[in-house]
Amino acid sequence: MAEEAFNLSDLIDEYLERESRPPRIGTYWPSEIGHCTRMNYYKRFIPTKIPSEKLRVFKSADLAHSFAREVLASSDRVRLLTWEKSFSILHDDFEISGRLDDMILVKIAGKDVPVVIEVKSVSGKSVGHIRSPSVPHLYQIHPYLRAVRSSVGIVWYIARDKFC
């Protein structure tokens, strides 16, 4: 057996590359709604390999989402109804397809109200600098609201370094 350099980081990169899903022509993800049309075109017609650093950031965001889900599921103040709910909205010759992060039931003015939660992880130790949701994140939550017929949504920012 030939001796090769062994690097555990390479195992992570190989795993993340296998798990990545390339975009399909005619199908768009809600997270792309706020992006430039040219960028969406190039992603589909002239695809490039996603750098491993970016795949690692995506994975760390998934881990933050898992943590948020655990928090919601363990709370006695809200009820977690569903998570990672897949949906598809067809319109003429294109499709908006995705998975909403979480949906909870909250009591507001004595009524049970379904609320869509869109978790956004940000780098750093705090989200204190964020005063309002970004416009693309607001665009992104609308297809989720339509798919589950809810009128209330929250964009929840979580700092990846400290989960606050």
Image: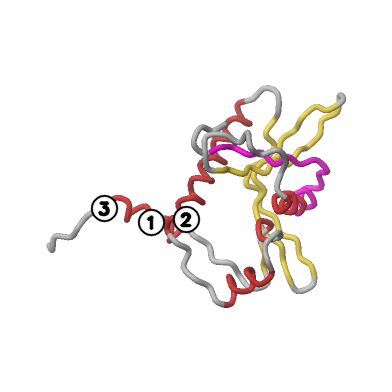
- Distance between the alpha carbons at the discs numbered 1 and 3: 10 Å
Q: Which mark is residue 7?
A: 3
Few, some or many C-alpha atoms within 10 Å of disc 2 (few <14, some 14-19, many ≥20)? some
In the rendered structure, which segment of residues is drawn in magenta? 143-159
- Which residue reaches farthest front? 129
Position in image of residue 155 (x %, y %): 70, 42
Q: Nearer the viewer, residue 62 or 126?
A: 126
Name the side, left or right, on which 83 lies relative to 110: left
Q: Which amino acid does label 1 sit on?
A: Asp
Q: Do the residues labelled 2 and 3 touch (CB within 8 Å)?
A: no
Residue wearing tag 2: 55
Name the kind of residue labelled 3 in the image. Answer: Asn
Give how far across and how far down residue 87 sits, in percent. Answer: 70, 55
**CA–CA distance in space, label 2 to label 3:** 17 Å
Q: Do the residues labelled 1 and 2 touch (CB within 8 Å)?
A: yes
Label 3 Cα neighbours within 10 Å, binned few <14 / some 14-19 / many ≥20: few
Q: Which residue is drawn at 81% across and 34% down?
A: 113
* N-term-proximal mark, 2 vs 3: 3
Mark 1 neighbour density, 10 Å: few (under 14) some (14–19) many (20 or more): some
- In the image, residue 50 above or below residue 147: below
User: Furthest-bottom residue in view?
Assistant: 45
